[in-house]
Image (cartoon, rainbow, N blue to C red):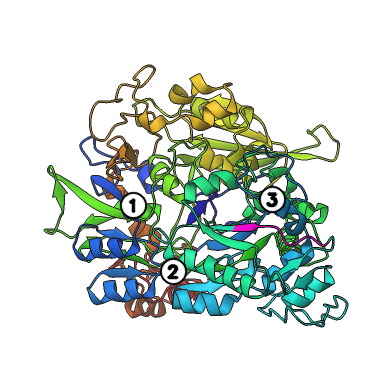
Amino acid sequence: MLKTKSIISTVLLLTLLGLTIPMINARGNEASIAADDRKGPAIDIFRFTVIKSPDAALMAMQLEEGDVLTDLIRTGDIQKLTADGFTITSAPGFHMGHVGINIRPNRDYLTPPYKCNPEAAKVLSDVNFRHALLHLYNQEEIVASIYGYIVTPIHSLVPPAQGGWVNPNIPVHPYNPGDKTGTTVYNPATGEYADACSILRYGGYTYDADIDNWKCSQGDPIPAITLWTPTYEVAPTSAEHGARFVTTCNDNGLTSISHVPREFSPYMDDVGIGDFDMYMVFWSLGRFPDHLESMCHSDHDVAVVPNDYNSPGCNDPDLDAAVRTIITSLNHTEKLEAAYEAQRILYSEDYPNAAFAYLQLYSRIMFNGFNPDLRGIVNSPGYGSANGWTYMNIRWAEGLERTEGGETIVEWIWGEEPELLNPCSASTVYAWDVIDKTLDGMINVNPYTHEDMPWMATDWSITSWPDQGPYSNETWMNLTFTLRDDVYWQDGNPYTASDAEFSLEFLRDNEIPRYMGMWQWLHDVEVLDTYTFRAIMTTTSQFLIYDVAGEAALLPPQVWEPLDGQPLTTIMQYNPSTDTSATGMGPWFGTGDGYASTHLFGTGPFVFEFYNPSLMSGDLHQFKGFFLSTAVIGDLKTEMFHSVGDVNRDGTVWGDDRGRMGALFGVFSFEPEYDIDVDVNEDDIIDMGDISLANWFFGDQKEYP
């Protein structure tokens, strides 16, 4: 089961302020798109159907009742779909899973009736108890036996796909239960007897064979502690994973720990206010480890800011300093050292108010299955093939189209129902899978290289404001965006700089918890002209530009203005997906397929039509007012893939591309033999830079199959 964090990430490192960021030419922005050109996605209807049982989902694919099944977690399903001729893609994911532990020493912030056991705070807040739990987690055996080759065990809050950000020397706590009836005691000075039972004895716990349970130093038995996982019906592998961990705990005398499968969204609602003992969750992340700040800094504690991201309650000044440096520093080396330090603290027993709050499970290799007749699938490292470029360009092979009412349709199978479709309060990937398709941002990402490219903004810049903050040593920064003039909300109102101002300031003024990572630094938004706005931030940060870029078109004013200033609960409980009031809406509202008919809309490529909870199915439709034509979107993909070495633009980087580069090696742009198509990195010479790109991406495809 997944929780999503809205972070746009790329490989661009902004190490200096005061510079305008060079843009990749947005061909669609300059191209003249004829009025009768089809706009947006290549498919008309994107249908999502919830099938909770993995067995039933597999059968639906085999019976052609579903066309796409993502997040394949069982090796048997992959093998069966492969044997049946389905297109299977895989890529290491910006993904991680963990068991979160409530480490707060008391739970006075809660009011009864409790979903958790307040008495559990006596032991879960003890770093020795949590340290022992890590040594009771038989990670290698559990992961290998349940998942096989489709996941990678991890020991850090930074997944392997984030590359060099992973601390290679993080303290590891391997499976080592020890002997509950023994007498050895852990020695932290030497590391001797680093097993679970010896660590418990070091922490003052004693095993009582008469009750088959450990007792606290005060003589009381370990209180009841519950681990929540998704249900066996929805996520049998996750449920089994949790059950095996708890069984090991029980076998070693921690018999008061129990495994309770629950519906995912309700238990994550409880986690969002800190009303839990332990829970299992999986995250979709981005390119950079900026999630460490929101998941670990004490400012983001859900006991203080409900529905923020620091669910366990980490509260350590050294950890706060490290994760804040990751966010605010513009020095890459400094950020990298801070990321390493944060990971060290999280798994070092010397930090009792943070260590072992997150018991890491695994990171996914993203396996997805597609009907073999589908085309336009883009498999992006880290993101997998279920990404925005696939959604915009997926289509049926010519002559094999699936249609409904004369429109092409793709049926996507999801494993869980979306909760409330509200961009201010949605917390699971299932809700965001719907919402994201209706939204768009200022910046997009080349799926092959992860480089920035202009999207709703044609240009942006960062400039510094030295000594303009309330303290003389503080440096602020300006983020200035120049917008396209042909972007529309899905109700027909043009998208302008005033809309960006409203969206960003609404999040700040109403203190929407899930966007605190942006608005805590937002001083003001200035509208410079109809299509230019400036966000004034009270700190420097590489990552804030992506937060601002991703959230500036989150909330259409015509929908959210009546809610501005209302109680937070009113805002968070609002359901725009069922509100069909036309008051204040634009000229396209309610005019038919391809335009907004509910208040859940944005500027994105798909328009939300409905979700029927009885049928557990919903539709999104191609947005007829999207700012790029279908053809231009396809051209963009061709040019992006050309830039990694596809000289002849045939969709594959292969020997013929490298051969052409070799034949013209060393030729400069002023020489008659020069061919701009061979100079894929466009540096005016055909050299090792071009050949290196072709070597790195050799064998890759623009799209699958």
User: Few, some or many C-alpha atoms within 10 Å of disc 1 (few <14, some 14-19, many ≥20)?
Assistant: many
Residue that numbered label 1 is attached to:
391
Residue 327 circle label: 3
Mark 3 lies on a secondary structure that is helix
Residue 103 appearing in the image: no
**Mark closest to the chain's N terminus, 3 or 1:** 3
User: Residue 82 sits in which quadrant?
Assistant: bottom left
**Mark closest to the chain's N terminus, 2 or 1:** 2
| Amino acid at circle 3 | Ile
The span from disc 2 to disc 1 (Cα, nearest Å) is 17 Å
Mark 2 lies on a secondary structure that is loop
Front in this rendered view, residue 526 or 173? 173
Residue that numbered label 2 is attached to:
91
- Residue 309 horizontal side relative to residue 663, left or right: right
- Residue 190 horizontal side relative to residue 691, left or right: right
Residue 601 location (% of width, % of height): 39, 33
Front in this rendered view, residue 411 or 259? 259
The prevailing secondary structure element of the residues shown in magenta is loop
Residue 3 versus residue 548 in the image, above or below: below
Magenta-highlighted residues = 219-226
User: Few, some or many C-alpha atoms within 10 Å of disc 3 (few <14, some 14-19, many ≥20)?
Assistant: many
Residue 18 circle label: none
Residue 80 appearing in the image: yes
- Asked if residue 687 is among those painted magenta in the image, a careful observer would answer no
Front in this rendered view, residue 147 or 463? 147
